[in-house]
Amino acid sequence: MTSSRNEGDLDQASLDLFIAGDESRSASRTDETEPRSPKEVAPDSSDPLRDISRLEELAAVAVECRRCHLRETCNAVVFGEGNPEANLVFVGEAPGADEDRLGRPFVGRAGKLLDKIITASGLARQDVYITNIVKCRPPGNRTPDEGERNFCIPYLHAQMRIIQPEVIVSLGAAATQGLIDPRARITRMRGTWQQWRGIDVMPTFHPAALLRDPKKKIPVWEDMKTILGHLGLSDGEEPG
Ligand code: URA
């Protein structure tokens, strides 16, 4: 896939604090002119959701989930949304109050910033898929603990098996710990390619961290440029 933008344009967008670019391009496989080499996500024989092959079906199971106690206090199961054939998936931590109210991921302040990151990348929210490690809001917006993550992660694994994206962006420590390594430190791991079952994973800072510390927008933008380059949407680094 070729891009009409070059790296200079992307740098300009970063200076605008992820303000929208004027074009939209798709990270969906359906828009590719050449087939990409498929990276099969290995089936996990212990996965109780392994026979589910459609996101709608998986969402219906998730809505009924009582594996942990979070469903007792949340309003909605925030399953995820976006392009079911996305090449690019963003994974956050857990829904907050706005997401719990609306049943959609990343629709609060952090979500608005994620939207800007996506738009500045020349993409639209409907081109990518957005979800969380934990689908139910922890009370008081606390970080989900390891047990809650472990109960919920089969849903994310099943989502990735169905979508088969080329790149997963793990946003922040909780997502990176849930997906890659429970001891992962986001400050050390961000910007470095990781692997999850044959899929390239790029950890970067969570948008909420950028709201607290806007200086972190620069490394996040560097990470996005690397990802876009890997997807053939700009010049960038290939994962080593
Ligand atoms: N923070 C997250 O990690 N996920 C959301 O959906 C919203 C905020």
Image: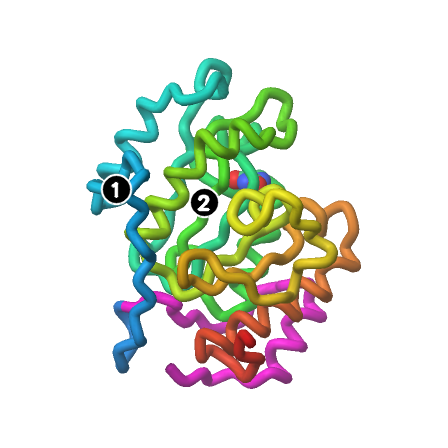
Q: What element carries label 1?
A: loop
Q: Where is residue 178 in the image (x, y as percent from the top left)?
A: 54, 43
Q: Where is residue 112 in the image (x, y as percent from the top left)?
A: 58, 48
The magenta-colored residue range is 1-29
On screen, residue 94 above or below 22? above
Question: Which mark, by number, is residue 131?
Answer: 2
The residue depicted at 56 percent of the width and 28 percent of the height is 97
Q: Does the magenta stretch include residue 146?
A: no
Q: Nearer the viewer, residue 205 or 19?
A: 205
Give neighbour class at mark 2: few <14, some 14-19, many 20+ (Cα, 10 Å): many
The residue depicted at 52 percent of the width and 63 percent of the height is 119
Q: Position of residue 137 (x, y in %)?
A: 52, 27
What's the amino acid at mark 1?
Answer: Arg
Q: Nearer the viewer, residue 19 or 195?
A: 195
Q: Nearer the viewer, residue 176 or 136?
A: 176
Q: Does the magenta stretch include residue 27?
A: yes
What's the amino acid at mark 2?
Answer: Thr
Q: Which numbered disc, 1 or 2, marks the residue closer to the eye?
A: 1
C-alpha distance separating marks 1 and 2: 19 Å
Residue 83 occupies quadrant? bottom left
The residue beneath circle 1 is: 50
Return the disc, 1 or 2, that comes first in the chain's sequence. Answer: 1
The residue depicted at 59 percent of the width and 51 percent of the height is 171
Quadrant the N terminus occupies: bottom left
